[in-house]
Amino acid sequence: MTIEKNRGVIELKTDVAVVGMGYVGIPLSCLLAKAGHGVIGIDIDQERANLINQGKLPLKGEEPELPELLREQVDRGLLHATTDFSYCRKIKVVFVCVDTPIDENKIPRFDRLIAAMEQIGRNISSGVLVVVESTIAPGTMSGKILPLLEKMSGLKGGENLFLAHCPERVMSGKLIHNLKNIDRIIGGLDERSTEMAISWYSQIVIGKLHTTDMTTAEAVKTAENAYRDVQIAFANEVGLICEKLGLDAFEVRRLVNTCPQRDMHKAGAGVGGHCLPKDTWLLAYGGKEADPKLMPIARQINDAMPEHTAELVIEILGKAGLAEGKETCVAIFGLSYLENSGDTRNTPARTVIEQLRNRYRVIAQDPYISAFENVEIESDLENALRMADCAVFLTSHREYSVLTLERIAELMRHKIIVDGRNLFDKKKAEDLGILYAGVGKG
């Protein structure tokens, strides 16, 4: 293919396609290009493709190495983004990094993945390897992806169509680091598919490559995230108990973890991100015949934490004698689900805001986010504190962790804090005359 570059035309020889240019697809594309491959990134969003072709990272927040790496590979002519799937016709491997959400009934939504696979199937050629990095319910590769690709392409799996599932293990803020360094699970359709996938991942992954079958790989990815989700739910439930007992869950956690083989997590204002809120349901869906009970309960606990945080706000404002109405201002600090990131997927802030916006005036401040779903944004941290009757901290951004209680007390109209991330010491806050409530702190 040819592309226009700096008013000229250059030839881009591609042997790799990456479908879905988001938090997984972009770093994967950059590392493959760095390894010397011509990469065509395919996304349905033309604006995103345009930004990538300008060497601009369309992701928010801090991503070490990635902005420079993207710009370098685009400038080298080894990475180009498009919305056209026809470029899949002459490539050797297609990596699929498409979003796989769940619906309101906690059932996997396959529409985006199926739409991508239909386009891929129409355009691939004999001998291609298709690798799915998207997180999917166990049974999806063999039950949906393989039959669909065979139908759309006319190829036969294991003969002239090769297929593998290598679920991503990245997270916002550590995309390049995790992709390069963390071990990967490669589940191949057959021995040849596995060998082909290993040959590609060994070029970009320093961590070990563990091989298995496709369904086991699906179960591993969903189970590893469901396991963490259950651990967090336990910590949150201990936090709720400590609030009622007048205890500090973080001190309880510290002492619990002095016992060998204990790794208690932290209670908090909620679990967000692309993975944990849905991957538990993906595993439960794949194993629905076993009638899972623990994981759905864990999800319910974690889903309820943002609402509980909002209840703490309502309770403490009532205790302070501040009436409901727009004259009372609640400032939300942290809109992203993860510290030092601009990723707002499934962020707890969304639920907290929805619970409070009809009772009070709600504003928000986040160093990485300039607009968020009909909420008034105050870009300056100290101005937001000056406007606030109650400051609600939902994300452990670096800017908040270095904020002193003395400065907060000096700036706020009413000295009230709801701490959803254990950023501040309760006793010190109360010594400064701050009315304080924290998740997990009685």
Image (tube, rainbow, N blue to C red):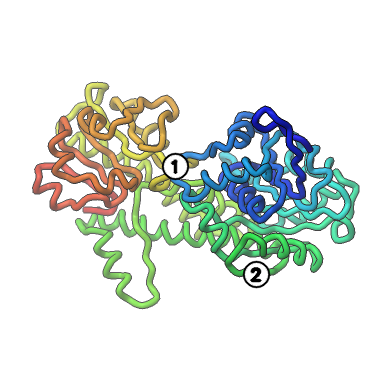
Taking the image as drawn, is residue 289 in sight? no
Circle number at residue 210: 2
Circle number at residue 61: 1
User: Which element type, helix, strand or loop, lies under badge 2?
Assistant: strand
Asked if 275 appears above or below 10 in the picture, the reply is: below
**Residue shown at 23%/44% (left/top)?**
403
Asked if 186 appears above or below 354 in the picture, the reply is: below
Specify which label sits upstream in the sequence, 2 or 1.
1
Image quadrant where residue 337 sits: top left
Circle number at residue 231: none
Q: Residue furthest top?
A: 326
Pick whichever, 219 or 89, lies toward us: 89
Which percent across, then down, holds residue 295?
51, 57
Give the crowd class for mark 2: few <14, some 14-19, many >=20 residues within 10 Å: few
Q: CA distance from mark 2 to mark 1?
A: 31 Å
Whether residue 156 sits left or right of residue 236 in the image: it is right
Which percent across, then down, holds residue 313?
26, 38
**Residue shown at 68%/42% (left/top)?**
77
**Type of residue at label 1?**
Gly
Image quadrant where residue 54 sits: top right
Whether residue 18 sits left or right of residue 412 in the image: it is right
Tag nearer the camera, 2 or 1: 1
**Type of residue at label 2?**
His
Give the crowd class for mark 1: few <14, some 14-19, many >=20 residues within 10 Å: some
Which percent across, then down, holds residue 397?
34, 46
User: Which element type, helix, strand or loop, lies under badge 1?
Assistant: loop
